[in-house]
Image (spheres, rainbow, N blue to C red):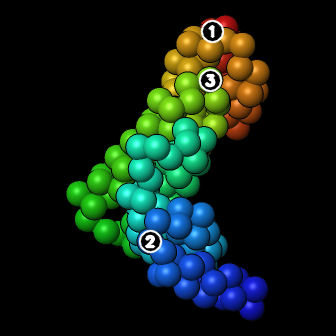
Amino acid sequence: LFYLQDAERGFKKASELDQSRIAALLGAAKVARHQGDGPAAGAFAQKAKDAVAKETPADVRFDVLMDLGDARAYEYQQSVLNSLSPIQQAELYQRACDAYKSARAIHAGRPEPILQLSFFEYNRGARGDALQILINAIRETPEQFRLHQYLCDLSISANLLKKLAETY
């Protein structure tokens, strides 16, 4: 806990000194998530996204959007646990999905956005949607072994092996 608090102070100080310090803002977002503060994680990740410029390398933009998706997904989970209004929950849900989809648009060949989006859907109880996301992605990029493996893992976990067999 001491190291987490020390990291929090360091990342916050670095992000205050220079608002365009994307790495510091993402670090602060990750620390906030580890400390269980979804709104702070979302705020820091959003600041990192806002600091991204047109000339920012694609890999950095991808990482920022993935971290933003993770922060918004965590913030959504907390909104459900805290029984926030359905409108607030829907907004957080949409922001998480949009971040993952935007990351996918930057690097369509990388499976991480699809894996995280399907994991997010699965954890919120939308198992059918999670499987459908993976099935659609596999149709686009059938050579992505990680997508097939994750589809199998989720199908086994959700007890949907028959649907998996029908799909293949």
Whether residue 159 is situated above or below residue 35 in the rendered picture: above
Amino acid of disc 1: Glu
- The image quarter containing residue 91 is bottom left
Residue sitting at 52 percent across and 18 percent down? 136
Residue sitting at 37 percent across and 50 percent down? 95
Q: Which mark is residue 146?
A: none
N-term-proximal mark, 2 vs 3:
2
- Give the label, 3 or 1, closer to the camera: 3
Q: Which mark is residue 109?
A: 3
Amino acid of disc 2: Gln
- The image quarter containing residue 116 is top right
Q: Secondary structure at mark 3?
A: loop
- Give residue 17's position: percent from left, percent from top: 50, 81
Residue sitting at 69 percent across and 88 percent down? 6
Q: Which residue is mark 2?
A: 19
Whether residue 50 is situated above or below residue 82 in the rendered picture: above
Q: Which mark is residue 166?
A: 1
Residue 156 seen in the figure:
no
Check the picture and name the quadrant holding the N terminus: bottom right
Residue count near mark 2 (Cα–Cα under 10 Å), binned few <14, some 14–19, many ≥20: some
- The image quarter containing residue 46 is bottom left
Residue 145 seen in the figure:
yes
Whether residue 57 is situated above or below residue 21 in the rendered picture: above
- Give the label, 2 or 3, closer to the camera: 2
Task: Give the residue furthest to the front.
Answer: 55
N-term-proximal mark, 3 vs 1:
3
**In this orientation, which residue lies closer to the viewer: 76 or 110?**
110
